[in-house]
Amino acid sequence: MSSKGKFYMTTAIAYTSGKPHIGNTYEIVLADAIARFKRQQGYDVYFQTGTDEHGQKIQEKAEAAGITPKEHVDKIAGEVKRIWDLMNSSYDGFVRTTDADHEAQVKKIFKKLYDKGDIYKGAYEGLYCTPCESFWTESQLVDGKCPDCGREVMPAKEEAYFFKMSKYADRLIEHINTHPEFIQPVSRKNEMMNNFLLPGLQDLCVSRTSFSWGIPVDFDPGHVVYVWLDALTNYITKIGYDTDGNSGELFVKNWPADLHLIGKDIIRFHTIYWPIFLMALDLPLPRQVFGHPWLLQGNGKMSKSKGNVLYADELTQIFGVDAVRYFVLHEMPFDNDGIITWELMVERINSDLANTLGNLVNRTISMSNKYFGGVVKNGGVSEAVDEDLKSVVTQTAAKVEAKMEVLRVADAMTEIFNLFKRCNKYIDETTPWILAKDEATLPRLETVLYNLAESICIGASLLKSFMPETADKILLSLHAQEIPFEELGRFGHYEDGNKVTEKPEILFARLDLEEVLKKAEECQPQEDSRESEAAEEEPGIDIEPKPEITFDDFMKMQFQVGEIIECKAVEKSKKLLCSQVKIGSQVKQIVSGIRKHYAPEDMVGKKVMVLVNLKPAKLAGVLSEGMLLCAEDENGELALLIPDKKMPSGAEIC
């Protein structure tokens, strides 16, 4: 296959404060699927990942554990690499920000920007969030806490160097406006423009003096380079960028990056700080930054302090690597958060992997062995139903390619499984067990089984980027080779007269939820107590009781599941959001005082619990026809109540 050109992609580098959970691991699996697919298409891919190893939080964790920061990051970086490898990720480069070549270039980059006048010395006084390593002004806080993580902030004052962000702001705004593909999804672009760029950028703190675990500013002892100028530059230092103009072949070949794949929580740093740094270095900007959504445990962001963390090694021990890859790739929406629970994992594995895929492969091979001694031949007896099968199968590659081009990975996987579902339907339509009863219809049976083997080979070849081990097992069981991508739109690759394996492997066994939950309790890893951020038992909340109601009173209230299909901020209010909520066949407009807790773009697609028969009322002049149900803690934090299983809109809550 001839190369279509280079494709350089990166993940965010994992922060080495602790072991990455499945929400962190989702990103490397997503990146790996994209990288593998690009290679399959014929691109010369360089896929980079790594670890971010400096900062105050790491220094404090190391001190608390009685070890050096380097000892701490060495251990965690090894753990990150182990998990990335466990998940079968095919990265080409793994960077550590403690690497000597990275540190040397960061020092030179800092000095170059200082000599250019883009960095100046000053002092910072503000509110600091240690976990996020971010400074905030009073107006940026949400309920007096960090707007990113919701934790406490502390007053901080220190001498520091600053980068003149406003110098490049207009140029960046123009670039974003003229390159609509630069920030994806579009909701992330709108957020960056409206919340940060258009109101005006403040100068950015790029050095610290209150801790020492960082890359020294070599011309000013006591200062270390602050996290983002250190971390973000890994995308160029690892591939051989040299500030003095002697960059290596890998950098010359691959820069600019074609894709930075990152979590939505760090989109600001990658679409504002990073491109401005690149402009200051006179380097071209990356083609695209994609801010993927979060993978939530139940309905909340995974956090050790909340005690709701799942780890990849724990999940793979029970389900296997490819089953976990399938779930996190297929169940994550394009721009809304996804949910992972033990129950959802079992449901999806049983329905999609054990039934749709595993049963199809097993039935096809078993019938070939039973009726023809494992030999697959095209009997040359075709019927109209064959053409419909072939049409679906041969069009799948183009559909998958179109979805992957816009990074709709879950949709691409759906197209592949539609192929497998069509094969299962084909078995029901052609009834091989009936054809086998009459010698006159054996040639037709041969054709049916050949068409199935060929279709499965095409499907497995497409599946290779997403579930590589499973695809290899399928092809091996059929004694077939992976079909080149450019040939997947044609039917008839499977060698006539080929023989399948005698005993097909069970790809995915059906699971019992109770047994899975029992295994989950047994295999939970025990972390070193020095590093654990184990959740403290949260005290319950007592509220003022309301008068008792009768069952008849309760039955007057109608609760249903609704799906939010549109959401906008109410212009006349700082607190209200106006949602269009689909409930069965009708759509109700509901106004809710949750604007501080949810962005409008994050509401779309959520399944929520709705009080449907509340008397309509106007809030800030906008009609509201119901109520979204929320939980509220003692600090006034709100959380929408969301079904923990997939439910159709309109389902009754009783």
Image: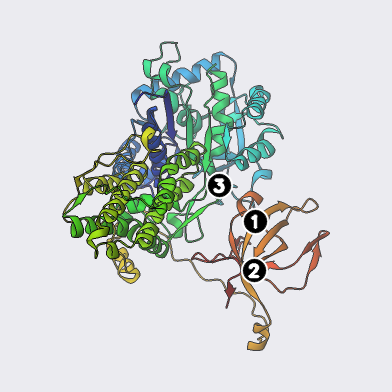
Quick one: quadrant of the C terminus?
bottom right
N-term mark: 1 or 3? 3
SS for tag 2? strand
- Mark 2 and mark 1: span between their CA atoms? 14 Å
Q: Which residue is mark 3?
A: 335
**Disc number placed over residue 610 in the picture, else none:** 2
Q: Of helix, strand and loop, which one carries label 3?
A: loop
Whichever of callouts 3 and 2 sits on the residue coming sooner in the sequence is 3
In this figure, which residue is indicated by the disc labeled 1? 565
Of circles 1 and 3, the one toward us is 1
Residue most toward the right? 621
Secondary element at tag 1: strand
Q: Where is residue 48 drawn, in percent x and y?
A: 38, 31
Q: Residue furthest front?
A: 440
Residue 541 got which mark?
none
Callout 2 amino acid: Val
Display colour scheme: rainbow
Question: Whole-percent x and y of residue 188?
Answer: 60, 41
Report the front residue among 654 and 435.
Answer: 435
Image x and y of residue 198, in percent: 71, 33
Q: Residue 259: tell me if it is visible.
A: yes
For the residue marked with disc 1, what is the amino acid?
Ile
